[in-house]
Amino acid sequence: MLLELPRIHDPRGNLSFLQNRDHFPFEIARVFWTYDVPGGFTRGGHAYRTQEEVIIALSGSVDVVVTYPDGSHQKFSLSRSYHALYLPPLTWRHMENFSTNSLSLHLSSHPFDEADYIRDFEEFRRLALG
């Protein structure tokens, strides 16, 4: 789900912000960012069992491709720092088409836990479809 973050317009430059639970449904437990991704490479290619995530392209652009259990895809092109993509648990995703000097910020509901990752698409399908 694409979220619109607040924008404060000012002749000196604009400002956007986010606050826990005001703009997305979880408390932030971990923050990381992705940058210097070489052309043609992808990141992600997994889902989380319980973790929720918000992705914001702070600089440049990146496409986030969500794959549903039936194999269909939806592409979200992030290129504005006031747009955020909310990904609930059991959402398969990968990131592609990084622009030069792109910087994406990731806000997570849980600390890193390798056991929370689902890296096999068939396992994801089984869990997502119940």
Image (cartoon, grey):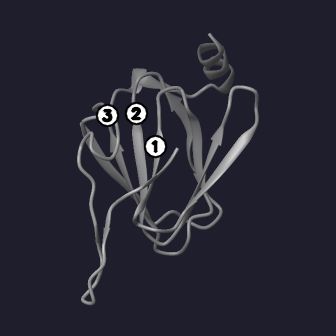
Classed neighbour count for the residue bearing mark 1: other residues with Cα under 10 Å, few (<14), some (14–19), many (≥20):
many
What residue occupies the far top of the structure in this picture? Answer: 130
Q: Quadrant of residue 83?
A: bottom left
**In contact (CB < 8 Å): disc 1 and disc 3:** no
The reply to whether discs 2 and 1 touch (Cβ–Cβ < 8 Å) is yes
Q: Position of residue 60 (x, y in %)?
A: 48, 72
Amino acid found under the numbered disc labelled 3:
Ser
Label 2 neighbour load within 10 Å: few <14, some 14-19, many 20+: many
Please provide percent x and percent y for residue 84.
Answer: 43, 54
Mark number, residue 86:
1
Towards the viewer: 48 or 8: 8
Q: Which of marks 1 and 3 is nearer the N terminus?
A: 1
Of the image marks 2 and 3, the number of the one nearer the N terminus: 2
Q: Residue at x 30, y 31 (%)?
A: 110
Snapshot quadrant of residue 91: top right
Q: In this view, does 105 lie to the left or right of 12?
A: right
Left or right relative to 47: residue 114: left
**Residue type of the residue flagged with mark 2:** Glu
Residue found at x 59% / y 14%: 127
Q: Are the residues flagged by discs 2 and 3 in contact, CB closer than 8 Å?
A: yes
Location of residue 67 by image quarter: top right
- Please tell me whether mark 1 sits on a helix, a strand or a loop: strand
Q: According to the image, label 3 marks what residue?
A: 109
Q: How far apart are marks 2 and 1 (CA)?
A: 8 Å
Q: Which of 34 and 127 is in front in this view?
A: 127
Name the amino acid type tagged 1.
Tyr
